[in-house]
Amino acid sequence: MPLEDSGAARRSGQHPCGVTGCEGTRDTLHRDELAPDVSRTGVIAEDEELWPQLDDGDVTSGRGEDARRALQRAGSGEALMAELSERVQKVVRSSSWWERHGVDICILSCSLLALPVGFLCLRSAHAIPFLVGVLTLGVGYHTLAVKGSHLASHNALTKSKSWGKVWAVFFIEFCSAFTAEQASYNHVKLHHGYTNVIGLGDSSTWKLPFLNRYIYMFIAPLAVPIITPLVALDLLRNVEMRAALRTVCLMSLGLCCHYCLLRHVSGFQSPWSALLCMLLTRSLLAHPYIHVNIFQHIGLPMFAADRKPKRIQQMSLGVLNLPRNALLDWCFGHSLISCHVEHHLFPSLSDNMCLKIKPVVSQYLKEKRLPYNEDTYGSRLQLFLQKYEELMVHAPPITELVGIQ
């Protein structure tokens, strides 16, 4: 799945994947020595030193030289990450509890409290109140299932690990009908620990190469509420029996509560109409949910496990921010939309704190001449429709960088 290496794109400072700020990432890396390191997420990752041996072809083509200068300007990965962490910690230490946790807890609480209003609105025989009920339940569900589950999986809602576990089980299993253990392992351990590393954290689980572009992008997302619990049941083979039983009970309880409330509070007479309403509300924002998960990593530089750059360079190269959007910011959270780079660098921070440190991170990366990838939702959608075969069907190419120690 080679990306087009257009000369015009290089001259404009734009990577062929269509993302501004992602330059010089497809050149050749030659390194002789690897050094295992522990990433700041607590996941053991092979963070290596880069030892260059430039071929004549790399230098004369200009691409190798550009990448070499870029990484030379970037300097030592550990030193850069330590300096950025210190700047971010100053912001965190000066922030109140409300800024660190309160804002996001308030959003989740409001969404939970709005659910009864949604169920009651669905009792109406008039179109407008009924649509208000659908929108209220859909927005509330996605806020709890996506934003709540994401924050809980990173223990970003509270300092207490015990309460963090409780919230993870509630949001991921009861609200989302998924397994907390496997969600945390796949997302926190793999995706964050090995972002864009082929075979580990490369977002390949989102690919369905047997579907064509239009079915995948516009029709398949409607099946997410059905596929999610089925995938969860399959993954339960990898967890302890006690955890598997808890997961099955909470998943069943969450789905049954939704169904029973539609039947007995909203007044649906037919089981099929209640199930159809469940599907409608749970898939209301499934399209942007799928899109966001692929837009922000797939199509960006990919790495082999033994050839990835230092953490700060890996995250600045392989992660992308989308513009702020009121609906998606509320339902998915800033860390999944406009602050995804910040989230991958500091995953334990809440959505509101990711938004607060965004100016610090963006300024620092630009100051150090590291990529700070940003693109619009429409631009990414157009790119994926145009290059669906390359990005979502074929195996992604490994990006190799020319650098110095």
Image (tube, helix red, strand yellow):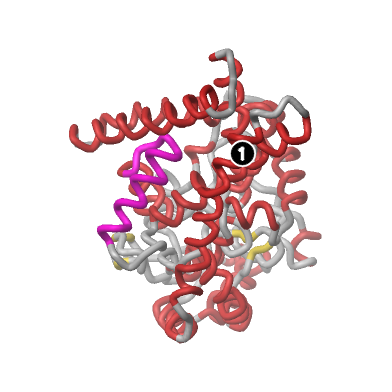
User: Is residue 370 depicted above or below 181 in this figure?
Assistant: below
Question: Is 178 contained in the magenta span?
Answer: yes
In this rendering, position of residue 191 left or right of residue 20? left
Image x and y of residue 318, in percent: 55, 59
Which residue is at a point 68% across and 67% down the rendered structure image? 21
Amino acid type, mark 1: Gly
Q: Main secondary structure of the magenta part?
A: helix
Residue 88 on image: x %, y %: 48, 80
- Is 241 magenta? The answer is no
Residue at horizontal 33 percent and vertical 60 percent from the top: 45
Residue 315 in sight? no
Pick whichever, 18 or 117, lies toward us. Answer: 117
* 222 left or right, relative to 157: right
Q: How many marks?
A: 1
Q: Is residue 125 visible?
A: yes
Q: Is 24 or 363 nearer to us in this picture?
A: 363
Residue at x-position 34% and y-position 27%: 234
- Crowding near the residue tagged with mark 1, few <14, some 14–19, many ≥20 C-alpha atoms within 10 Å: many
Residue 6 lies, in percent from the top left, at: 75, 55
Q: Is residue 234 above or below residue 139?
A: above
Q: Which residue is mark 1?
A: 118
| Badge 1 element | helix
Q: Position of residue 171 (x, y in %)?
A: 41, 46
Residue toward you, 246 or 309 = 246
Over which residues does the magenta segment extend? 161-180
Identify which residue is drawn at 61% across, 17% down: 273
357 w.r.t. 173: above or below: below
